[in-house]
Amino acid sequence: MEVEWEWLIKLIYHFNMKLKRVSISDTNLVTNILNKAAEVFEIPTAALKGARRHGNIQRIRMAVSNVARVENKIHYTTIAGVINRDRSSIYHYERQHASWYISWKPYQKAYDVLCRAMAENAKPTLNKCQIKRLLKEAGITSIKTGKCKIIIASGNTSHTIKSNLYEFAKTIEQLKPILANFDHNLDIKI
């Protein structure tokens, strides 16, 4: 994991790349949806990520994509990267979702079962005071002159931590175990 952060830091620093927003949690959420689908429908994740277009596998893959996109508003490229499809496939799945849901009963059942399974695993959200308390207990503080922003969002609440370029990877690694039991999104603005 450290290598990935070093690569990102070097890329930003050396090429002066301007990143608007990087979502850390979205990839994890799509992976969780994919794993839940594999568990519920008893299909290996490798098959859902694979090249096979068998009807049952493709239907579950489309349901995974649409739960991630329609229900959770995750970006097309993030979903495509996790399920090993191109972005245009995700566009197609989203565009056809309403039609499939009304007219294709096996798809409707797969989508509903997956949505219910994800709802059963829903984690509690945090309010702003709880986020601040968790950060204080962990010793995570905001750097006033920091140009990188780590945004913690949970439910309808968000909290921003400022960090410098070299400390933000360490801070994110500290945040992951603290927030693991709660519904949250971690975003980075550089």
Image (spheres, rainbow, N blue to C red):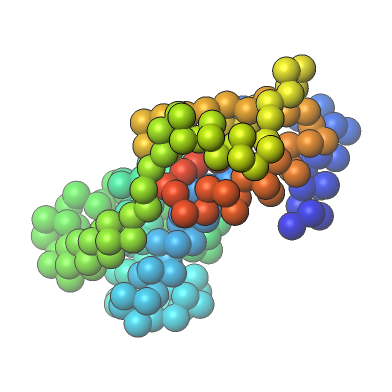
Query: In screen coordinates, is 180 left or right of 63?
Result: right
The residue lying at 59 percent from left, 53 percent from top is 177
Q: Quadrant of residue 126?
A: top left
Q: Is residue 127 above or below residue 65?
A: above
Residue 78 x/y as whole percent: 52, 49
Residue at the farthest right position: 14
x 36%, y 48%: residue? 124
Residue 148 in picture, x, y percent from top left: 70, 27
Examine the rendering and report whether any part of residue 147 can be seen: yes
Q: Quadrant of the N terminus?
A: bottom right
The image shows residue 56, relative to residue 62, as above or below, that is: below
Q: Residue furthest front?
A: 137
Measuring from the top left, give residue 112's x and y in whole percent. 20, 61
Where residue 11 sits, quadrant-wise, is: top right
- The residue shown at (79%, 54%) is 2
* Viewer-proximal residue among 48 and 86: 48
Residue at (47, 75) in percent of width and height:
45
Please indicate, yes or no, whether residue 111 appears anywhere in the rendered image: no
| Quadrant position of the C terminus in the picture | top right
Q: Decide which of 128, 164 is in the foreground and name it.
A: 128
Q: How many marks?
A: 0
Camera-nearest residue between 2 and 7: 2
Q: Nearer the viewer, residue 166 or 129?
A: 129
Q: Residue 10 appears at what percent x and percent y? A: 85, 40
